[in-house]
Image (cartoon, rainbow, N blue to C red):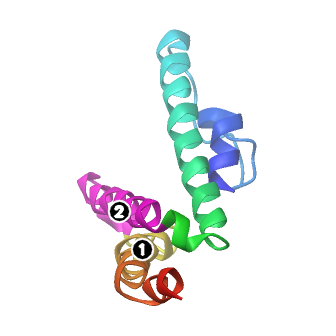
Amino acid sequence: MIGVDNAFGGIATLGWQGSTDFFVVVDETAFAVRDSHIRFISGIWLAIGLILGLAAFKLSLLKEVVIACSIMVFIGGLLRFTQDETTILLSSRLLPSLVLELVLFPLLAIWTYFGVANRITTA
């Protein structure tokens, strides 16, 4: 959902995550460049989501891709700590995402590598 919201809505989003009036543009050119980057990165995020969705049906085929996507999400979660404002990072708005990125996705990678995914490929 976030991938679609930002890929098609840019920095302002399509409004699926709430109000879109949370910033003011003071430099149209700089905004357009950053908006384009956000759309690109969100397209990548959307593609990762689609791949993980497909992996629910074709895990044996996409095992390595699921592990790679899980590692990318984990690294992204770690990089959230480069933000100066840790109170927002640990707030109820971001903490659920952070827990998923730093706990669930590593567990998904481990499960995919050692767990049921191996039994699927050998069955």
Q: Which residue, as the protein is rendered here, is positioned at the far front? A: 123
Q: Which residue is mark 1?
A: 105
Element type where label 1 sits in the image: helix
At which x and y percent is residue 36? 55, 24
Circles 2, 1 touching at the beta carbon (< 8 Å): yes
Of labels 2 and 1, the one closer to you: 1
Q: Is residue 94 left or right of residue 3?
A: left
The residue under label 2 is which amino acid type? Gly
Mark 2 vs 1, N-terminal side: 2
At which x and y percent is residue 30? 46, 15
The residue under label 1 is which amino acid type? Phe
Residue depicted at 42% across the width and 74% down the height = 105
* Magenta region: 63-89
Residue 113, magenta (yes or no)? no
At which x and y percent is residue 107? 38, 82
Q: Quadrant of the C terminus?
A: bottom right
Q: Nearer the viewer, residue 109 or 34?
A: 109
Q: Is residue 5 left or right of residue 115?
A: right
Q: Which residue, as the protein is rendered here, is positioned at the far top? A: 29
Q: Which residue is mark 2?
A: 77
Disc 2 and disc 1: Cα gap in Å? 10 Å
At which x and y percent is residue 2? 63, 53
Badge 2 density bin: few <14, some 14–19, many ≥20, Cα 10 Å: some
